[in-house]
Amino acid sequence: MDESTIRAQLADLPVPDLRYFPSVGSTNDIALSWAESGAPDCAVVIADEQTSGRGRMNRHWITPPGSALAFSLIFRPTPEEVARSALFSPLGALAVSETITGLNLTAQIKWPNDVLINGRKLCGILAESVWQGNRLQAVVLGIGLNVTPVSVPPGNLLKFPATCLQTELGSWVDRWELLVTILKEILTWRPRLGSPQFMQTWEDRLAFRGEEICLETPNGVALNGKLVGIEADGGLRLRLADGSEERMLAGDVSLRPAS
């Protein structure tokens, strides 16, 4: 695959520009730099191999050659979207889950933005921002989706069970057709960012809803309780054993099922 072929694949989408790399450290790093130097809205960075990709909380995300989708989409938020900028990350998760559903698989979203199949992580998403003073200039949405078994790290390196699309489907998948579909879904859902339909669909796909979970904060505090649902700003509601509720903001915690 080369850049000209990918451009042809995306020709019918409103993607004004793209950069393709056979190998790169992190597509988000490239996209952030490009955003700072004037990349247009909906420009995309794509890599066949990613050697130092990042997930939430600085976790490493490695993409072996030819095994996965690794791309970053640059948004120039409208004034209305600036107020909802925390929802760009679940926008990516919702688009991926819609794509997976279209393949007759059941996808769930592990708050705030991982996509699961059969309780195993298929896709990770990282949203990062470019600021000028106190003004939001751009949001970079990085998406890494496991396609072939090679993309799944060994079990001893995983904090959460993982899988890939080909294993779950039992058949070969064209990565670039998958990319086109995910981008279409992102562009379809973007105008509904934060709408009742957006929030309800996200909550309907929420993994572990109504189940006992453990929320681990960066400072090591663990909260056990029942996952109730999502707040309008994307925060998570957790009901504790005493009946009180805690509200967590996206990006503040690591979530796992209660043991």
Image (cartoon, helix red, strand yellow):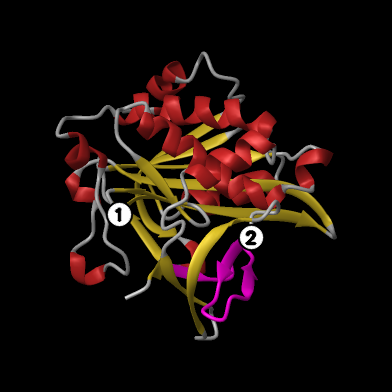
Q: In the drawing, does residue 135 fall left or right of residue 96?
A: right
Against 169, residue 225 (above or below) is below
Residue depicted at x 85% and y 59%: 134
Q: Is mark 1 on a helix, strand or loop?
A: loop
Instruction: For the C terminus, give its image quadrant.
Output: bottom left
- The amino acid pointed to by label 2 is Gly
Q: Which numbered tag is attached to residue 119?
A: 1
Where's residue 74, x and y in %? 62, 40
- The amino acid pointed to by label 1 is Gly
Q: Most extreme residue toward the left, as rendered?
A: 170
The range drawn in magenta is 235-255
Quickly name the residue at label 2: 235
In the rendered structure, which disc, 1 or 2, sits on the residue that comes first in sequence? Answer: 1
Q: In the drawing, does residue 249 fall left or right of residue 116?
A: right
Circle 1 Cα neighbour tier, 10 Å, few/some/many (<14 / 14–19 / ≥20): some
Against 243, residue 136 (above or below) is above
Where's residue 251, x and y in %? 58, 65
Where's residue 206, x and y in %? 47, 50
Q: Is residue 248 shown in magenta?
A: yes
Separation of marks 1 and 2 at Cα, in angstroms:
22 Å
